[in-house]
């Protein structure tokens, strides 16, 4: 492992782990509110596996960028990539990635023993997509599919699993009986969970899109054909704006679930700082100064929803 804790945290970009921890909290609170159930050990196993794997995929992405970069100067290489900035040994970097993956796999296997086959399949698929996102002949992050895959898997699949592990298969049941695989899906509950996840899905996609908008010139030079490279910077900025406004569709689901109307309306107040951040980023998309606004938007949208859902859980138990 990296001997310096501060360097390790920079290498795995610990500040970006909100992109996985916030969906984890949202799914957990959703299960508490919707299903009145919570298993501490299952939540702990998922937390360890999720955080370790998120750190591992970031580390793999940084390592892959370090190895494949054609441009050896500029903010994206000399400053943003921790391997270059902190002069890390390649052997130490690889060992760190392997240990994080082992920890993630161990936590995931422990969770499967407490839950079942569906978690194994979804978790395994998430591991595969996470690896392919940064590694392989053509990583997903170097294609115009990065926003779609990161949004769906980090925004929806994480929320789904973190809620599902507390439901005792009342949402989806996958059973093997006498050689037959039986799948039972409560369509309404799955749809509720999906629309509830919309702000997380689009917020995470927005972070990836903002990152690719800022890196568009470097990506062209490094042959990373991301979505902004295909649709152009102007259209990418328009899409960036649209993602945030569509994200408020989840308010309808919160009302259908019975969350207090006053609490739901409080979420609309986030539109004020959100619009300001969108405008500032659109005027000057820059990795060093304005990219952070996409992360702040994601945190703002979803932290308020966590607070509202937490308050709804407390009001329900009173």
Image (cartoon, helix red, strand yellow):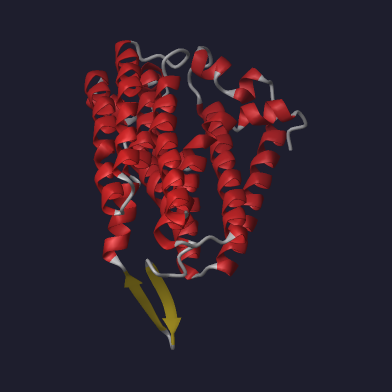
Where's the N terminus, which quadrant? top right
Residue plotted at (70% across, 26% down): 6
22 relative position to 246: left or right:
right
Residue 295 image point, x, y percent: 44, 27
Point out residue 128 in the picture as x, y percentages from the top left corner.
48, 52
For image coordinates 27% across by 48% down, the residue present is 255
* Position of residue 131 measured from the top left corner of the image (x, y, whole percent): 50, 46
Q: Residue at x 40, y 25 (%)?
A: 294
User: Looking at this rendering, what residue extends furthest in the right direction?
Assistant: 3
**Rendered view: 22 above or below 4:** below
In front of the other: 215 or 252 = 252
Query: Does residue 58 appear in this view?
Result: yes
Farthest front residue? Answer: 318
Nearer the observer, 74 or 282: 282
Residue 193 point in image, percent of width and height: 34, 54
Identify the residue at image location x=59%, y=68%: 113
Question: In this figure, what is the number of numbered marks?
Answer: 0
Q: Is residue 141 left or right of residue 49?
A: left
Left or right: residue 67 versus residue 209 is right
Q: Is residue 13 visible?
A: no
Q: Single out the residue that lies furthest toward the bottom.
A: 178
- Measured along the vertical axis of the image, is residue 217 above or below residue 83? above
In the image, is residue 144 above or below residue 293? below
């Amino acid at each position: 492992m990296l001997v310096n804790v501060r360097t390790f945290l920079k290498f795995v970009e610990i500040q970006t782990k909100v992109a996985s921890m916030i969906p984890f909290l949202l799914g957990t609170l959703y299960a508490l509110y919707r299903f009145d159930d919570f298993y501490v050990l299952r939540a702990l196993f998922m937390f360890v596996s999720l955080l370790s794997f998120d750190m591992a995929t970031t580390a793999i992405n940084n390592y892959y960028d370090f190895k494949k970069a054609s441009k050896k100067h500029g903010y994206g290489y000399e400053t943003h990539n921790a391997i270059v900035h902190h002069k890390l040994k390649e052997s130490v970097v690889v060992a760190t990635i392997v240990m994080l993956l082992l920890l993630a796999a161990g936590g995931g296997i422990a969770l499967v023993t407490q839950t079942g086959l569906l978690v194994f399949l979804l978790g395994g698929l998430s591991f595969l997509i996470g690896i392919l996102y940064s590694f392989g002949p053509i990583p997903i992050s170097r294609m115009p599919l990065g926003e779609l895959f990161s949004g769906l898997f980090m925004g929806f699949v994480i929320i789904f699993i973190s809620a599902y592990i507390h439901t005792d298969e009342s949402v989806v049941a996958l059973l093997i009986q006498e050689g037959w695989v039986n799948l039972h899906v409560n369509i309404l509950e799955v749809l509720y969970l999906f629309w509830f996840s919309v702000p997380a899905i689009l917020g995470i996609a927005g972070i990836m899109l903002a990152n690719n908008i800022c890196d568009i010139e470097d990506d062209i030079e490094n042959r990373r054909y991301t979505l902004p490279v295909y649709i152009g910077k102007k259209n990418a900025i328009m899409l960036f704006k649209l993602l945030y406004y569509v994200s408020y569709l989840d308010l309808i689901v919160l009302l259908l679930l019975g969350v207090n109307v006053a609490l739901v309306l409080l979420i609309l107040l986030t539109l004020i700082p959100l619009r300001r951040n969108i405008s500032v980023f659109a005027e000057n998309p820059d990795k060093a100064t304005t990219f952070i606004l996409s992360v702040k938007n994601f945190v703002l949208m979803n932290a308020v929803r966590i607070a509202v859902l937490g308050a709804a859980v407390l009001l329900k138990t009173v």
